[in-house]
Image: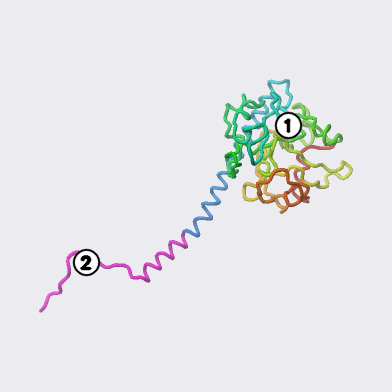
Amino acid sequence: MHSKKVRCGSRGGFTLIELLVVIAIIAILAAMLLPALSKAKTKAEGISCINNLRQLELAAVMYSGDHNWCAPNAPGNTYNETFWVNGWLDWGVGVPPGANTNVDYLKNGALGPYTGKNVGIYKCPADKIPSNAGPRVRSISMNGFIGSKTEYTVYGYTQYRLFLKESDFVRPGPSKTWVFLDEHPDGINDGFFGMKMPPVTAWPFPAAWDDVPASYHNGACGFAFADGHAEIRKWLDAASMPPIRKTVGARGPGQGTDATSPRDSRWLVERTTAPL
């Protein structure tokens, strides 16, 4: 009887077909997991964005309490201690120089002392496209009807409410009046978000966009409201989500500006201010 010889140290290996099956399984698992990971990342960025907006709204409330309940001023194209933020953003070097990347324009604004110098809260974490000078320090703008008479004196919306003091938030009410939002990166410049309002006789018929909100969160935008809550609004109309082209001063429906979003602009019109 002959004994079977076994070579010491020998072991079986995968066949080519087995390897291909394993690789295919790994590819399928990766394809299943990547969308889930991407969705989780988007959700985390949305939570962080809401937290930033809440902190800014809290800072605005504290500022108001220290200044006879007057709201901080919305425009921020030059240095002024009453402006909630200072500096002018673009895709180049900035006007004044360095505003794209210089955090002093944030720290020296009216809300600077109330944010603990935490400059990170002025920007949505999903805003990842840098200017030519480097990553921009801000993505957030303020409702132009708050703290400023610019919507009256420049744009002629004299039949609408201004919110100059805390006591002015009567209509549409604190929970229905947004204070801060993320602005589209092609449109953001100063800290003022202008909203085209319809004639009061046509209220609340939707108006065309002037400044354009952002859509960083998978077609959604972050908002902070006067009562302190923040939320993410999912846009419904394509005109509310124009692509980012890194252009400065471009106008027209293709840029979002002057485009009409029947559902979205109406939603924002109703939460920006109200007729007198």
Query: Is the residue marked by circle 1 packed among few (<14), some (14-19), or many (20+) residues within 10 Å?
Result: many
Closer to the camera: disc 2 or disc 1?
1
Percent x, y of residue 83 = 70, 27
* Residue 134: percent from left, percent from top: 57, 39
Q: Is residue 17 magenta?
A: yes
The circle drawn on residue 206 is: none
* Amino acid residing under circle 2: Ser
In the picture, measured across the screen, residue 187 lies left or right of residue 162, that is left
Is 67 placed left or right of 114 in the picture? right
Residue 194 inside the magenta-drawn segment: no
Left or right: 10 as drawn, with respect to 228? left
- Residue 68, by quadrant, is top right
Q: Secondary structure at mark 2?
A: loop
Residue furthest out toward the bottom:
1
Magenta residues (range): 1-29
Mark 2 near mark 1, Cβ–Cβ under 8 Å?
Answer: no
Q: Quadrant of the N terminus?
A: bottom left
Q: Is residue 6 left or right of residue 57?
A: left
The vertical placement of 257 against 54, above or below, is: below
Q: Secondary structure at mark 1?
A: loop
Q: How is the image coloured?
A: rainbow
Check residue 75 in the rendering and tell me which mark sits there, or answer none.
Answer: 1
Tell me the amino acid under the disc marked 1: Pro
Residue 108 figure quarter:
top right
Nearest the eye: 127 or 245: 245
In percent of the image, x 55 and y 51: which residue is there?
39
Q: Quadrant of residue 197?
A: top right
Q: Nearer the viewer, residue 116 or 166?
A: 116
Give the farthest residue toward the right: 201
Q: Position of residue 74 (x, y in %)?
A: 73, 31
Disc on the earlier residue, 2 or 1: 2
Q: Which residue is the site of mark 2?
A: 10
